Image: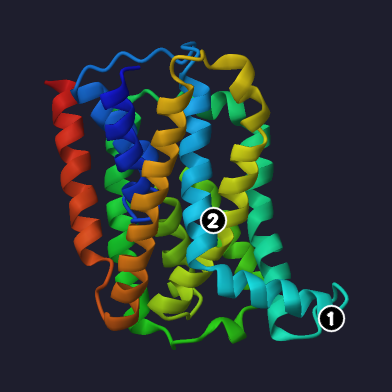
Amino acid sequence: MRVWQMAVLAILQGITELFPISSLGHSVVVRTVLAWHIPKTSPDFLPFLVVLHVGTASALLIYFWRDWRDILVGLWRARGKPRNAEARLFWFLVVASIPAGLIGLAFEKRIKLLFANLLVAGAFLMVNGIVLLIGDRLKQRRPEHTLEHMTVGKALIIGVAQAFALIPGMSRSGVTVVAGLGKGFDYAAAARFSFLMATPIIGAAALLEVPKLFHIAGPVHIDAIFLSGVLAGLFAYGSVWVLMRYFRKQEVEALRPFGYYCLLLGASSLIWYFV
């Protein structure tokens, strides 16, 4: 990969990983439309993706550092048991992270086959758009809860929804926020839980591959790869900053603009594919 291509993909990752518009879907669309033939066997490809995810996870950790401090302190005071609100939130996040982890491990090879498929990405971008529009309708019909109303069952349902984000075109933040709205949470609470659960799952997936960086990437591109991770992290931090303020202020139809955008991009991608 060229350095400027790394920069473009890093910015794209930083924005689309947290906005409910699918980072995987955008990556497939951009690489296909711009005819970027980046082979997965390239020595730079895997470490590049890993570092981008480390950058995104770091941005989330920095933004929510007070939340994580309170969660860990509460967990320590409760001696690891769900005796207070912070400890319970920790275990809810653990429960919510299990489904995507298990499904990802079980179907890893099959899922990877979809990563470069514009037809799949375009179709599921449209599905993602419809899901976001449905989420707004759910918000209008459900009572609004805070995370104090979280239960194991609700956390598990949100976790199952997260597993759909393994498909290019489906947004992890989008489907988890919609699942949260469906269980009665308001936009801010659903988004907060979504971003908190993203930190360990993105970080764990990335850190599993970090030791491979120094064995795979050539010395010429190491600096460019790590700078790409910093760039992705900066844009990810900006994205979560904007989104959390947006969801706190928006009381109705907060997901509608993103839903229409995904429908338009998905339809355009399918037209490009067939024409």
First-in-chain label (1 vs 2): 1
Q: Amino acid at mark 1?
A: Ala
Give above or below for 84 relative to 242. Answer: below
Q: Is residue 67 left or right of residue 49?
A: right
Q: Residue 121 or 233: which is nearer the viewer?
A: 233
Disc 1 packing (10 Å; few <14; some 14–19; many ≥20)? some
Which residue is painted at 30% across and 67% down in the image? Answer: 242
Which residue is painted at 44% across and 19% down in the image? Answer: 221
Q: Is residue 50 left or right of residue 37?
A: right
Give above or below for 197 relative to 234. Answer: below
Residue 12 found in image quarter:
top left
Q: Secondary structure at mark 2?
A: helix
Label annotation for residue 198: 2
Residue 266 found in image quarter:
top left
Which residue is painted at 50% across and 41% down in the image? Answer: 53
User: Where does the image place residue 4, in percent across and percent down from the top left?
Assistant: 26, 26
User: Where does the image place residue 208, in percent across and percent down from the top left?
Assistant: 67, 35
Q: Is residue 166 visible?
A: no
Residue to which mark 1 is pinned: 78
Calculate the distance from the C-alpha at mark 1 to the C-alpha at mark 2.
24 Å
User: Where does the image place residue 150, in percent across and percent down from the top left?
Assistant: 61, 79
Which residue is painted at 46% across and 33% down in the image? Answer: 226
User: Where does the image place residue 110, in percent across and percent down from the top left?
Assistant: 55, 25
Q: Is residue 25 visible?
A: yes
